[in-house]
Image (tube, grey):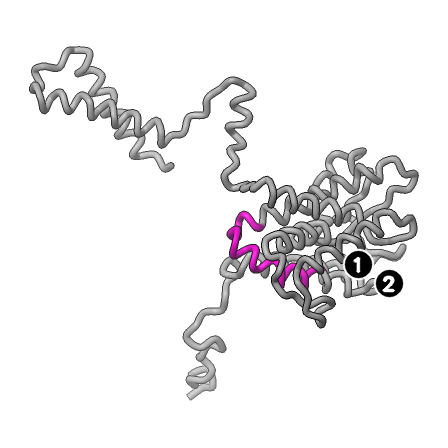
Amino acid sequence: MGYQDRPYFNESPWGERQPPKFSDLSMVTRLIVITVIVYLLDLFTATSKGGNWLGNALALHADWWKRPWEVYQLLTYGFVHSPLNSKVGVAHILFNMFTLYFLGRPLEARYGSREFLRIYLLGIIVAGLVWSLIRLPLENPGIVIGASGGVSTILALFVLNYPHERVLLFGVIPAPAWVIGVLALVSDIGNALSTSSTIAGEAHLAGVGFGALYFFRRWNFQKWDWSGWFARRNHLRVHQPQDDYQTLQEQVDVILEKISREGEASLSRKERKKLEQLSQEIRSRKQQPW
């Protein structure tokens, strides 16, 4: 018997269970995995002039508007963090992912995975956009990296939803969520007003503001009808295929009811032609995937 025929060589390390798929993970976990992968890839893109090529390409440059094709930076900067050889080092990504993991999971359970993803990504974009506008007049506007804009949105939403929930301050001291929120807000204001701070307090505050607006305005991006907004501006009506199909069936039912009540001979030539047209339309629609 060869070694490959022995039972223990054919047993899966997961036993009868299949290894988890990426799509089976929670949205919070998927975001963390993607962020960590980007961080690790960035470690291998160091340049001879210092810095990392990948991180610089994905970072948000305040003057991105001069190069419209770099608008993607409003989102990608949220997946880049300080490299190992920087003063902040690995603490930057660890703090953001730690906060996202522990505060994001209850919110994902509350809002749903897709809505949580929308909130987080839009928080990053809004924070980056506000930061860019504030830095615009400066002679050296600089660049910004990090998920703090989106994480600040999640922090604000968590505090507003669960103000008295006990969380660990600095991972050690238990305190109500509202206390953590107040301390974070004071710190962000201080960083935004400081001329020497290397922390983008403006982006943090923008993320907090976006989270507060979402909470108090009771937004739900899943229910927003974006196509309807454009249609109203153009005085057009957006037709849904399902609605049209329902209308056709109702028209057929009216004619069939008349046949049942008065007989087929009672149909006029126009009604017979209409019934034939409706029947053909319904058959063709049934053959089309929705």
Point out the tag, 1 or 2, that comes first from the N-terminus: 1
Please identify the residue farthest to the top as the structure is shown. Answer: 269
Q: Amino acid at mark 1?
A: Ser
Q: Residue at x 34, y 34 (%)?
A: 288
Q: Main secondary structure of the magenta part?
A: helix
Residue 222, image x, y percentages: 51, 41
Residue drawn at (52%, 54%) of the image? 110
* Label 2 sits on residue: 87
Which residue in the protein does label 1 denote?
Answer: 82
Quadrant location, the N terminus: bottom left
* Badge 1 vs badge 2, beta-carbon distance below 8 Å: yes
Please, is residue 139 above or below residue 29 in the view? Answer: above
202 left or right of 279?
right
Q: Is residue 215 left or right of residue 69?
A: left
Query: Above or below — where is 11 with respect to 199?
Result: below
The magenta segment? 96-116
**Magenta stretch: residue 115 in it?**
yes
Which corner quadrant holds the C terminus? top left
Q: Nearer the viewer, residue 260 or 1?
A: 260
Q: Find residue 241 and report its horizontal and vertical position in percent.
A: 38, 30
Residue 7, relative to residue 153: is it above or below?
below
